[in-house]
Amino acid sequence: MSGPSYRGLTWDHPRGYNALAAAAAQAKGLALAWDRHPLEGFESHPIGDLCARYDLVVLDHPHVGEAVAADCLVPIEALFGGDEIAAWRSAVAGPSLASYLYAGKHWALPLDAATQVMAYRRETVALPPLEWAQLPAFATGHAVALSLAGPHAILSFQSICGAFGFAPAAPRDGFMDRAIGREAYTLMAALTGDVTRRACGLNPIAMLGAIERGDGIDLCPLIYGYVNYATRGVGFADAPAGPDGRIGSTLGGTGIGISKRCRAAPELLDHLRWLMSEPVQRGFIPQHHGQPALRSAWRDDAVNAATGGFFAATLATVGAALLRPRHDGAIAFQTAASARLRAALLDGDAVDPLLDDLEILYRTHHPAGAET
């Protein structure tokens, strides 16, 4: 195809690749090819290195502080008008666009919205629990697994803390309220039985696959939702609520960042506008195994009818989702903190030494006074 040529990088899953590749194949006035890397590539490759090799990079919001420090992305404000950005902000599900606002500018377009929700096997769970207080008793008669692999232990911990009333301050000079952290760890420890131990190495895709197959897991109370499993025997519901009815969840999803090596022609910007448009978000993207970002798509009757009601069943959780730390060093903190928490749960460690270590790790990887 004639016109400017671009190369993008996304993640190797139908949700992350199929819609982008299909859209690129029919793009007008440009040539766009998408490469793929594993889901874990988000954490294992510095964003600066990826931006040096690609024009477009699909990323999640914890990378924005690192990206700003590396000066490797073009702010969205430099490419799109303020009215466009404001319209997207009001149209997306939950804080999907706000999650990329850092140091006063947005660093990615939120193509895909996701957060931690409850997933369960429809064949074995007729009515999933609505509150965290119900989970320990529910687990006596069902195979309940926490999602602890990779970064997911600390993400689950933060979400449970959110359900119990934690709201991050700005600036966030400490990681977690001590009393709430004790409650969250005590609950996670109660749910770290044989099922969780056997599943502790499963990333969300593998965990959902196990639920689909009936491979020893009936329910995971907090796991990143994948619409692709909603028609394969996996039910989805809002994340469990805390004592006052508050839903706790930590935002996921992905955005498209434009690297500084990219010479963004009008044709490319029009292609990105097209991907963010309501007809595409409500039609093309879900029809190509994607998970749209616009709230209207999550509420769309036809989209929900085709996906087992996935979007309608979990939209409230997206709206309530917390952001992860996003400062330069957030990924390193997330990795180290999750490893420490996972080991503590599996080894039965006491809560206070764990919380001490999490605060030390946070301060080690968080520049004093830095935006979070």
Image: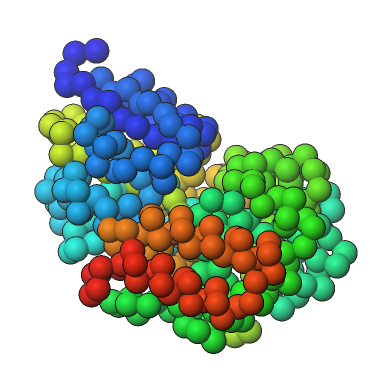
Q: For residue 180, which quarter of the picture?
A: bottom right
Q: Is residue 351 above or below residue 305?
A: below
Q: How is the image coloured?
A: rainbow
Q: Residue at the location (15% across, 34% down)?
A: 261
Q: Is residue 98 left or right of residue 176?
A: left
Quadrant placement of the C terminus:
bottom left
- Image x and y of residue 310, in percent: 61, 51
Q: Nearer the viewer, residue 69 or 336?
A: 336
Q: For residue 265, which quarter of the picture?
A: top left
Q: Is residue 157 above or below residue 296?
A: below
The number of discs equals: 0
Quadrant placement of the N terminus:
top left
Q: Residue at the location (59% across, 51% down)?
A: 149
Q: Residue furthest top?
A: 1
Q: Is residue 324 left or right of residue 29?
A: right
Q: Residue furthest right?
A: 141
Q: Nearer the viewer, residue 120 or 329?
A: 329
Q: Residue at the location (35% across, 32% down)?
A: 9
Q: Is residue 42 left or right of residue 262?
A: right
Q: Is residue 206 left or right of residue 114?
A: right
Q: Residue at the location (51% across, 34% down)?
A: 13
Can residue 115 be seen in this snapshot? no
- Image x and y of residue 240, in percent: 64, 70
Q: Nearer the viewer, residue 336 or 214?
A: 336
- Image x and y of residue 334, in percent: 44, 59
Can residue 47 be seen in this snapshot? yes
- Image x and y of residue 136, in percent: 77, 72
